[in-house]
Image: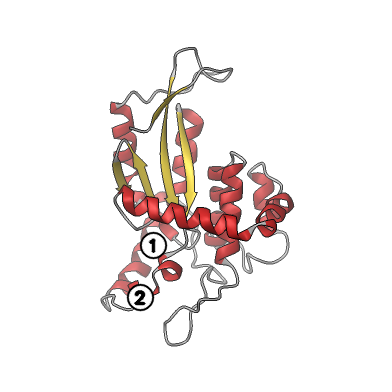
Amino acid sequence: MNVVYRKGDKMEEDSMTLSYALYWSFRSPYSYMVAPRLLELQRTHNVECNVRPVYPLAVRTPGFFQARDPLWVPYLMMDVYREAAFLGLPFRWPRPDPVQMNRDGTYPKEQPYIHRLTHMGVAAAEQGRGLEYLVEVSAVIWSGQVTGWPEGDHLRDAAERAGLDHDALGVAVDADPARFAAIVERNQVDQRAAGHWGVPMMHFGGEAFFGQDRFDQLKWRMEQQGLAQRTAQ
């Protein structure tokens, strides 16, 4: 079970802090949709999120989409806009797409954005601000309020809002890209071992909770394990 016990300045003595793993992709609209609720849960309750970014399926398993039913894309495009509206989140398919696609519908191995973006997410997690970084950066990519999200200061400003130094993250990633790639690969192996391949996927207490629509079930299960609100300081 993903349960840890901590004592410290921010928690009452003998309080219990639950923890869970979050497998998450910057190319997933549903990952964008669940992240604010997970961050709010962490802010208000004694729970910690272990952010474990993964590459999108289009990058790690390109053939996955070649076998899809022709109804898959039309339904997806309807559902993401409907779900965002239901949640009250601004939404537009990113410009540019974090994963570039060939004209024939295949995905080139060399990608201009997604690998470094994912590694930046790993670096943010190592700084203890992973969830904050996911929320801010995914909003820049998916909210529709920014065109050309990789350009200018959009990502730098998002990192700053998350309490991080964008340039410092970049220096760390660029200094050892192989280490960050290995971390992502390990995340992907562990994700499958935890019970699913898709994102967003939360893993808690030996159970996989796949999809942003499993947030309520995740919280319900945590409540069964003693999830408590943080005490005001």
Callout 2, which amino acid?
Gly
Question: Is 66 placed left or right of 138 in the picture?
Answer: left
Q: Quadrant of the N terminus?
A: top left
Pointer 2 residue: 63
Seen at 33% across and 78% down, the residue is: 66
Disc number placed over residue 80 in the picture, else none: 1
Helix, strand or loop for disc 2? helix
Q: Is residue 210 visible?
A: no
**Residue 133 location, x and y as percent?**
58, 48
Image quadrant of residue 71? bottom left
Q: Given the current orientation, which residue lies at the most extreme top position?
A: 13
Labels 1 & 2 near each other (Cβ < 8 A): no
**Residue 11 location, x and y as percent?**
52, 18
Nearest to N terminus: mark 1 or mark 2 = 2
Helix, strand or loop for disc 1? helix
* Crowd band around label 2 with a 10 angstrom C-alpha radius: few (<14), some (14–19), many (20+): few
Is 43 above or below relative to 25? above
C-alpha separation, residue under disc 1 versus residue under disc 2: 22 Å
Callout 1, which amino acid?
Val
Q: Is residue 208 visible?
A: yes
**Residue 225 location, x and y as percent?**
31, 26
Residue 122 or residue 71, whichever sits in front:
122
* Crowd band around label 1 with a 10 angstrom C-alpha radius: few (<14), some (14–19), many (20+): some
Is 144 above or below relative to 18? below
**Residue 57 location, x and y as percent?**
40, 66
